[in-house]
Amino acid sequence: GYRFALQNKSVGIVILVGSYYAPLDQPGAHLKVELSPHRLAGAVPQETQQRTLDRIAEYFLLKPQATGVAVHLALDVQGWQPPADFLSRMVTRARTIKDHSGLSSMEFDLSDVAVTYSQGQSYMIGRASSLQAAVYRKDLEMVVSDKVDYFREQWGASYDPEKPVWRIEMRFHHSVIREIGEGTGQVLTTYAQAAPFIHDFWAYALKNNRLMYNQRLIDPHWQLFSEDASFVFPRVGLYVVRKKKETIAAIQRNLSGALGNMITLWARSGLK
């Protein structure tokens, strides 16, 4: 939905400029900046916000104003793989679930991942415009994206090249982060504002997309992933509540339809 894309993989920055959905001379979502994990690793969020994101915004826009931040969180694991009945044991609020099994190729949007392989499975739960969960073979994807050296360095000595690596990824759309902020009394429209709560976001995501052991108990691996995952910031203990915008658009359409049907019946009945 943007007119121009500027990308530099070596520094881990993608800049999307000029929304197609808003006039260029009017306020709108005219700039989107995506930062890669290696760009964010080891950097203080406040410095990243000021020295990278804010400076880019000031360069491209007049009177820039932050309107939201999307957050992607991922956990890479070995020694575990999704069970054969993974989807049937998943409890989720999402209405969209995709199971890619035995595919020769699979493609997602730019903001997601691109995977090409002939074995294994990949699961996608939820829509990109909301809270989306993805479970896929990271050891295969990193070959396609040419990031083998980077991830082997990140995984360190604990990585076994002979075993598969499964990635559990939770993707928060910027509207979801904004709703969490409104529900918890926080202002979460920039990366610096949202970063301290990423561990709480992770726990919330795995709670709302959880793998069950049976009807009563959570799968012990899933509970381990939720509680023991290590992020830059410790868990704050934020009780995550999403406050969605109150709208009567659907009710208005229903009332309009009902009134239209009534007028049609009255006219056919000859009523004045």
Image (cartoon, rainbow, N blue to C red):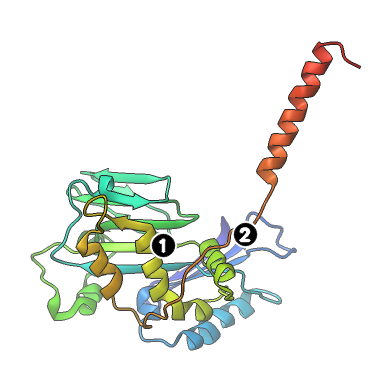
| Amino acid identity at mark 1 | Arg
| Amino acid identity at mark 2 | Ser
Relative to residue 224, is residue 235 drawn left or right? Answer: right
Quarter of the rendering occupied by the N terminus:
bottom right
Residue displayed at 57% across by 78% down: 56
Q: Is residue 165 above or below residue 227?
A: above
> In the structure shown, which secondary structural element does the residue marked by tag 2 occupy?
strand
Rendering coords of residue 55 (x, y %): 58, 83
The crowding category of the residue bearing disc 1, from other C-alpha atoms within 10 Å (few below 14, some 14 to 19, many at least 20), is: many
Rendering coords of residue 254 (x, y %): 69, 35
Q: Is residue 252 above or below residue 129?
A: above
Rendering coords of residue 88 (x, y %): 27, 45
Relative to residue 8, is residue 269 drawn left or right? Answer: right
Rendering coords of residue 81 (x, y %): 17, 58
Identify which residue, 104 or 127, lies in the foreground. Answer: 127
Q: Which residue is mark 1?
A: 171
> In the structure shown, which secondary structural element does the residue marked by tag 1 occupy?
strand
Q: Residue furthest left?
A: 162
Q: Which mark is drawn over residue 19? A: 2
Relative to residue 109, is residue 19 drawn left or right? Answer: right
Q: Is residue 240 visible?
A: yes
